[in-house]
Amino acid sequence: MSPDLWSLYALMLKSRLFEEAIAQLWHDGLISGEMHLGTGEEAIIAGVVTQLREGDAMALDHRGTAALLMRGVDPVLILHELLGNPDGLCGGMGGHMHLFSKEYLAASSGIVGAEGPTAVGFALSAQYLHPGAIAVAFFGDGAMNQGMLMESMNLASAWNLPVLFVCKDDGWAITTQSKSVTGGDLNERARGLGIPAAEVDGCDVSGVWEVSHSAIERARSGQGPTFLHARCVHFEGHFLGLQLIRIVRDPLREMPEIAVPLTQSFLRPGGAALRERLAGLKTVLAAVFSPLCDPRRDSANDPVRSARTILQSDPVRLQELEDQVEKEISSALASALVEVPS
């Protein structure tokens, strides 16, 4: 059995366009609060979710919209939820970080690492009530340092539960580089708990599909959990509006807000010695200019673009597919905004 790249690309593109529409609504002020998008994770989500069937469950993190959309949840319900409408997926009370779908056995949480206990609960239920069903936990690399996730992986191993633990590793824990706060190797950490681990390029949807296929079949056959370590890039950083990314995209507008107070502080009489000020200035400037070499700026790290490149050999079919997906998202967006007051 091999992956259908056309179907996978359609879902990835649908997710990308959907989240870009969400981003525009957020920038327009129609969605309040923080917004965490999964742009850059599409290959990981599609490669796993397309293999789920009725009775399988998903435990999602604060970037759950892509997985819910690909699983089949009505995009209009999701949009209404994000807009705070009472007819949203969760009555307009959950926002984007706490989305639930009883129909699809899917639950998301803004609590880092909560995907572990949720997935183990789903898997324990499946083991007793629905043999052959599995649970999938999606989380970031920062969650690997949370005790409840480690405890959940240990329990899944000890009880041989049908769980696929998917770590979407972008190398950052919010605004802290993960390597500076994470000891050891994540794959070895999973193996230390008795869970087989597999490494995969999170930008290669076919690769993700193949690796997760083996893990999912293993879980369905009663052989227990697997840890999937997939590296990716979050193109919007941890959340929409991340200042360092704004600097890269619009330096003339954003830099004065940093440069002016930084200069005033540096030249102010009194305070720390010049050597200490220079050291502090160097640290701040390094952080400010680091996005110029950030992998988020490299199109090679875009899973949607990578999949599209492979399909360009059939331009007519590709154009038809993209037109259809764009039409679906435009229709969903129009329907969701009909009842929004101007």
Image (cartoon, grey):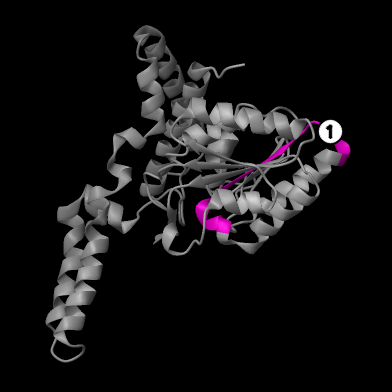
Describe residue 210's horizontal placement relative to residue 130 as left or right.
Answer: left
Q: Please give the count of numbered marks on the rendered protein.
A: 1
Give the camera-side residue of 219 and 74. Answer: 219
Q: Check disc 1 and report the residue beneath it.
A: 131
Query: Looking at the image, is 25 positioned above or below residue 117?
Result: above
Mark 1 residue type: Pro
Residue 298 in which image quadrant? top left
Percent coordinates x, y for residue 136 in the rendering? 66, 40
Q: Nearer the viewer, residue 234 or 327?
A: 234
Q: Looking at the image, which residue is at 35% across and 55% down? A: 242
Whether residue 206 sits left or right of residue 290 in the image: it is right
Q: Nearer the viewer, residue 110 or 177?
A: 177
Quadrant containing the N terminus is top right
Dot 1: element: loop
Question: Left or right of 258: which side holds 45?
Answer: right
Residue that appears at 37% across and 47% down = 236
**Residue 119, visible in the rendered structure:** yes
User: Against 230, is 244 above or below?
Assistant: below
Region of the chain picked out in magenta, as a range: 128-144
46 vs 262: above or below: above
Is residue 76 among the parts visible in the rendering? Answer: no
Q: Residue at x 25, y 69 (%)?
A: 283
- Image x and y of residue 295, in percent: 32, 44
Question: How dense is the environment of label 1, judged by Cα within 10 Å: few (below 14), some, or many (20 and up)?
Answer: some
In the current view of this chain or complex, which residue is farthest to the right? 128
Point out residue 340 in the picture as x, y percentages from the top left corner: 48, 42
Q: In the rendered image, which quarter contains the C terminus?
A: top left
Q: Quadrant of residue 88?
A: top right
Q: Tell me where residue 74 appears, x and y as whole percent.
A: 60, 31
Q: Is residue 64 part of the magenta span, yes or no?
A: no
Residue 134 part of the magenta segment: yes
